[in-house]
Each structure stands twice: as structure tokens, then as C-alpha cells.
Image: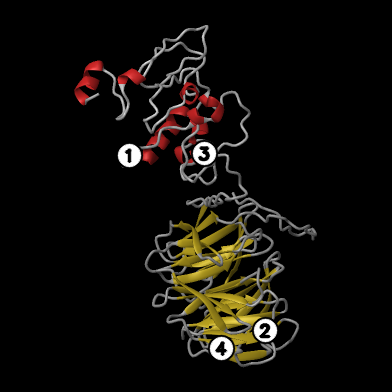
Amino acid sequence: MDSNQRRKSGINLPAGMSETSLRLEPFSPSSTPPSFRATQNAASPRTMSPRTISNLSSPSKSVTCSDRFIPCRSSSRLHTFGLIEKASPVKEGGNEAYSRLLKSELFGSDFGCFSPAGNMGSPISPSKNMLRFKTDHSCPNSPYSPSILGHDSGLSSESTTPPKPPRKVSKTPHKVLDAPELQDDFYLNLVDWSSQNVLAVGLGTCVYLWTASTSRVTKLCDLGPNDGVCSVQWTREGSYISIGTNLGQVQVWDGAQCKRVRTMSGHQTRTGVLAWSSRILSSGSRDRNILQHDLRVANDYVSKLVGHKSEVCGLKWSHDDRELASGGNDNQLLVWNQHSQQPALRLTEHTAAVKAITWSPHQSGLLASGGGTADRCIRFWNTTSGNQLNSIDTGSQVCNLAWSKNVNEIVSTHGYSQNQIMVWKYPSMGKVATLTGHSMRVLYLAMSPDGQTIVTGAGDETLRFWNVFPSVKTPAAVRDTGLWSLGRTHIR
């Protein structure tokens, strides 16, 4: 049968098969399942089994037989094999990420998960989890987690801990006091806060006491027209206060009785800085010397420490009374011990006067110091090894440093050129807060006995009170002496 004849008959037969050898039988419902029965002569090399062909047809539907088999999927149970759950593959070049994010937004966060097969499987049908108890909200391996879309994520805090919000520090002082005649002199120390919650301020030739609990102001003393106040420092118990004068004297007064207890000489010129240990009062002067005074001894001083080449303007005892740190206008930071009159450490990295000094109450042998205008750095030292641990350029003159006893943070006050107050987190030295308000360099700093409030003084003749530190996390039991308490006292 040639090609023209096959075209006329309308049947497309394979080569080697004649139309006469093919017999089609119509379908009858009562008969055996419909099939194509093809017989071929013996000479044909191809044989097709009717049973093989009949097995491909659907047994449940009546179909019209034709020259080729077209399967009917309406009666198939493809969902049994989970085939209808698979979405058609994304065309090459399509924006797959956009499509998935869009579906998550339209159908909710439950639609944002992906099939566990493969890293980027097809999204699950939005109706699959309908009315089903929700056990997992998101797939942790998915880069398109619902949390990115603003939905609640099922990821728990085991994998990632949310960052702790920064502590809020008020940017404005809660109290401002006028302080007329408060001197604008970098080398003086005219403000100190006692453990009995009394603030001492040197103004001109006078020393005034301000009781924080009652806001009562008391005039402690007047040195007269020929002298002036250069430094004030309370004892650790808060009962007595020492005063350094412009004539080089060191006076000790009873703060409660407003009565002078003792006057000690020894310096040739002004006494600009004082520091108490448990038993010893140290004084630093423009005469470059440090004198050690013991009130139990009749002599004016028991020892003299010589090491600075210029005025001594910074002085602090360590909390265990073992070491004394001194800073001078010669840019040196010296560390002294109890067993020698020569400095145990001579630290010369600062390039300006060292007035700001503080010891860590949290770690033994950790000392911080700040340099003047030409240096502007806060440096940290290990006094056991003598090594510098860190150095931070603050951008302006460092006038004072104080280490919080409640948390491991430091407050610094600054002069030229920004006149700011900064709170730092140690040891990361991340900035917790920057406070401004003084119009002149912040030369004076003191901390309240509860460790939460600081007071700053400047040449603008104001004292400003700031709440910068939190309370103690686990307060220890405090023995009430009847005179004072370490509990929180609000300054109003």
C-alpha cells in the first residue's frame, strides 16, 4: 500500500503493515474491555499483543476508539502519590525568590516553609495545613523565613539570643545648683561627695556643705582673704573632710560639728589634690612633692614621695590601700607602694598632664588614667605587670574619671573642645551615653554614695546632677551605723 493510498484511507500505518491486516472492533459494555486487535501476516517482523494494548486503557470510562490511545486523568488517583502537591517548576530566568515572598505575603506565614526535599524545594500548598495543629512555624534553613516578612517566627531563643537593648540614660540633669566663684582651673579638685550623702564644694575662700537628703546648705569655713581653697576630700567614713589651701596647708575638719581638728604644713605652695586611704592622707602640690600624713602621729607628715618634675594634679589610692597612683603636669603617671619611697611604676605614654585617675572596683590592679588637651586619651594599665591594656582617643581633654561600683562602666568628663560627659562600657569601651549642658570644660566630678548619681562642676559656675548608673543588681545587707546608710537617697 503506497503512501497515497494510506493518505486516502485516513489511517497512518507503520511501514510494512497493510490496511487489510488491521481489524477494528467497536466497544461493547458487556463485552470484554475494549482493545485494539491487530493481526499481521507471518511475513511481518512486528507483532503487537492485544492484551498489552488493552491494559493501557481505563476500565471505568466509555471511550471512543481511535487510531491512538489518549489516557483520561479525570478518574486517576494521582493525589495518592502526592503528585498534585508539586508545583510546576519555575521557568528558567524567572524570579523565584520574588514569587515565594509574594506567596508568603498572600497566603500567610504557614506558606513560607519549603519542602524538606532539597534546600529550595517547592512551597507547600496553602491549604495543606488547614485546620491542622501547628507544630512548626518556619523552616530554620530557609532564607525566606517569615520573620523577614514581619510575621512571628517559630525560631526560639536557643539558636539566636536577641541583642540586649541599650540602657537609657537621661540626657538632661535632674538638678542644677548655682556655684558662684567655682574656679576654672584644671589643676584644682574642688568637689567631693561623702559616704554620708553630703556634698562639699570649694568656692573662693570658703567651703560649703550641701546635704543631699534635705538640700540644706552649710558654710563649713572661710580661709580669709589671704588664702583660698584648692582641694577638698572626705574620709571614707564621711565624718571628716580635708582641705588643701593655696598657702600649702592641709586642714582637717569635722563635717558634723563644723570644727577644725588639725592643720598640717609641709608644702611650699598650693595643695591642689588630696587622697585618703584607710589611715593615710596623701597630698599633692605644685612643689612637685607628695606628702603622707597620719593623724595618729604628731608630725605634720610621715614621708615624702619625690618623683614628679612638675605640679602633682592627680592622686588616688587603690581600693585595697596597697598602691597609690599619682599624675602630674610632667605627663607622667606614677604608681607607688607602701614599701618604698620610689615609684614602683613610671608610665610615660601620656603626652599631656595627667589629672584624671581611677581604680577599678571590680578587678585588682586595673588602673585608668586620662590625659590633657594634647593627649585626649583614656589609657588602661595592669599595675601588676606594668603593661598598657588599651588606649581610647576621646577627642577632647580628659578632666576626670570615675569607675562605677554598680556596673563595669566608666564616666569621664571633658574640656576642650566639647565640654561633654561620657559613659563608657568596659572593657569594650562602647559609648553608653554622651551628656552635654556645661558651657565650659567640666573640671570637677563626684559620685553619690549609692553609685547612681554623679555631680559635675565647671567654670560656668554650675553644679549639675545626672542619673547615669543603675542600682546594684544584688544589694548586700548593709549594717546601719545610725549615722548613715548606703541605701538610695533621692536628691531633690
Amino acid of disc 2: His
Q: Which residue is mark 4?
A: 289
Q: Position of residue 24 (x, y in %)?
A: 39, 14
What distance separates the C-alpha of mark 1 from that of mark 4? Answer: 81 Å
| Camera-side mark, 3 or 4 | 3
What distance separates the C-alpha of mark 2 from that of mark 1? Answer: 85 Å
Q: Position of residue 415 (x, y in %)?
A: 42, 68
Q: Earlier in the sequence, mark 2 or mark 1?
A: 1
What distance separates the C-alpha of mark 3 from that of mark 4? Answer: 79 Å
What distance separates the C-alpha of mark 3 from that of mark 2? Answer: 80 Å
Q: Which mark is residue 94?
A: 1
Q: Earlier in the sequence, mark 3 or mark 2?
A: 3
Amino acid of disc 1: Gly
Q: Earlier in the sequence, mark 3 or mark 4?
A: 3
Give the colour scheme shown: secondary structure
What distance separates the C-alpha of mark 2 from that of mark 4? Answer: 13 Å
Check if mark 1's residue and mark 3's residue have beta carbons within 8 Å: no
Tell me the element at label 1: loop
Amino acid of disc 4: Asn
Q: Which residue is mark 2?
A: 293
Q: Which residue is mark 3?
A: 115
Q: Earlier in the sequence, mark 1 or mark 3?
A: 1
What distance separates the C-alpha of mark 1 from that of mark 3? Answer: 19 Å
